[in-house]
Amino acid sequence: MSRRAPKASIDPDAGKGWLRRALPLVKAHRGLLITSLALSFVGLIVQVQIPNLVRLGIDEAIVERSAQLSPYVWGIVGLALLQGLINYLARLYLLRTAYELEYDLRNILYTHMMRMPFAFYDRVQSGELMSRSGSDIRAVQMYLSFGPSILVQCLIAVVAFGLMLSINVPLAIVAMVTMPVIGVLGVSMRKAIFPVSWLIQARLARLATVVDENIQGVRIVKAFAAEGRQLRTLAESADRIRWAYRQDARIRSRWNPVLDNLPRLGLALVLLIGGIMVIEGNTTVGTIVAFNSYVLMLQPPFRLLGMMIMMGQRASASARRIYEILDTPSDVVDGPDPQVPPARGDLEFVNVGFAYPNGTLALDRLNLTVRAGETVAVVGGTGSGKSTLGRLAARFYDVTSGRVTVDGVDVRDFRLSALRERVGIVPDEPFLFSLSIHDNIAYGRPDASRDEVQAAAVAAGADDFVRELPEGYDSVVGERGYTLSGGQRQRIAIARALLVNPPILVLDDATSAVDVTVEQRIHESLREQMRGRTTLIVAHRLSTISLADRVVLMAGGRVIADGTHASLLAGEPRYAEVLASQEVTTA
Ligand SMILES: Nc1ncnc2c1ncn2[C@@H]1O[C@H](COP(=O)(O)OP(=O)(O)OP(=O)(O)O)[C@@H](O)[C@H]1O
């Protein structure tokens, strides 16, 4: 199925009200919406004719016997069938409008989220984003599509009242007496329920987070035998939801009987006043029967008014949460004149200062030049800023001061898509998708042939174990690749980066989970792969360091020494210290 782009977007003017900002979206689907509203209006007109036919049937065919009864009966059957057909079509179009709106909203939000920089994801919780792209979108969609339909249904009150007035003015007024009361009570009930339903939503979201964490972290939960504690947290959350639902039930059971029985009071009034009028010869029995139907028919729209007000409040809060994301601009975007210089593989950090969005200073006036084709190992204590180098080179974040250049061009002036192709990063905790191994390796080049994928896997030392899997390259790895070992996942991630063949490769402790003998083999093939390619290796093991032409030593976000392994070992005591502190991994 082909993907349709959203038909419109949300008005970017944050000064406007939420409904006005959503208007372009509704307008884009106005054909569907207007058709559905027009159909439901016609359906209502047909519906209000039925009690009138009943009245005429009773008065003319039964009481006065001046006409045949069967035409009225067939007339009512015909109108009912017609109304059924029209309602079916109206509902079909309304639901289609609703789901088209939901589709567009979801795509607009998702497209925007994909453009957001890493800093955004550092800040926002994934559970919250899930809820915004789920229930919040639904709340807005419901109001935009069902709101107008409820208004049309309320029009039935006007039409029916007009019809009643044309039959009998005083009785029409009597029949309508209870309606405003139903309207007011309906609104009051919704107002009473609103805070509780808000609470229910919030608590359901909280429960979802607890369940999500339990599932994502199930290995830790089990490893620490914390199932009991987790279950208690879950039970507490469930208990809070039960309490909120009980409040909801209490309010509903208090209001609903009143709202259900008020129309009966209306029926009694119509019978009393109408009965007196019939006895006095001022109206007919058929009129009383018809008015009874109208009283019952008018009740739902008045009750829906209360629901619409509540839906509006929810939708407004949900829209604000969605707009909050849409109004957050992505600061990591292409500049006015994005450049793509010829690929060589030069990488340079000039006086780079960088603090993460939470204020942690990671790099401090750092200078580092890596010439094309050079392999540089980055060594340093934990938190010294090693991983940050790669993140800035690929422009996951923008520097706070100074500049990072790739092939002589500041990464902020580089076309972002070209930059990400030029700088490949293999993180130490790779993420695999629940796809086949082939698709995971070919993620950056979906058109790659099986031979190319396999060649990359051979270079990354992954081919052997992949072949041993029951379905080889077509084996689907579990969620996040958990059916593979940590070292196997790392090798798939290396193959994924090698397949794209970037001129600059950053291996961020990319073989930390691979055992030393396998690492040796990977290194042999990597040595081949690194020829002519600029490579930055964040290294903890001596064996990895030995791959490099040059070693830079980092501390406190700066390069404090630079040279060959042998020269640093001889002349830089801090280098020996760092290596000694990482002795466990130098095996
Ligand atoms: N996403 C982030 N948000 C905030 N601070 C961060 C983030 N990532 C890293 N930091 C902080 O920035 C500093 C440098 O981190 P970096 O990951 O570059 O260190 P590292 O040398 O790679 O450490 P390690 O060897 O432990 O992986 C640390 O103080 C770290 O706590």
Image (spheres, grey):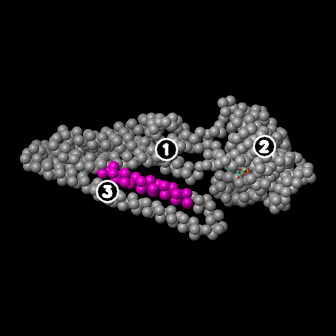
Q: Which residue is mark 2?
A: 366
Q: Quadrant of residue 503?
A: top right
129 in the magenta segment: no
| Residue type beneath disc 2 | Leu
Element under disc 1: helix
Please state the horizontal and vertical placement of residue 377, each as a whole percent of the image. Answer: 83, 49
Does any portion of residue 73 appear in the rendered image? no
Q: Which mark is residue 320?
A: 1
**Disc 1 + disc 3, Cβ < 8 Å:** no
| Residue type beneath disc 3 | Trp
Element under disc 3: helix
Q: Residue at x 59, y 59 (%)?
A: 213
Asked if disc 3 is less than 8 Å from ligand 1, the answer is: no
188 in the magenta segment: yes
| Residue type beneath disc 1 | Arg
Q: Which residue is mark 3?
A: 255
Q: Which mark is residue 129?
A: none
Q: Quadrant of the C terminus?
A: bottom right
Q: Residue at x 25, y 47 (%)?
A: 179
In the image shown, does 90 or 558 lie closer to the viewer? 558
In the image shown, does 67 or 314 lie closer to the viewer? 314
Q: Residues within 10 Å of mark 2 (few under 14, many from 20)?
A: many
Distance CA(mark 2)–CA(mark 1) = 41 Å
Q: Quadrant of residue 33?
A: top left
Element under disc 2: strand
Q: Specify which label sits upstream in the sequence, 3 or 2.
A: 3
Q: Specify which label sits upstream in the sequence, 1 or 3.
A: 3
The boundaries of the magenta stretch are: 185-211
Q: Which residue appears farthest toward the left when viewing the image?
A: 280
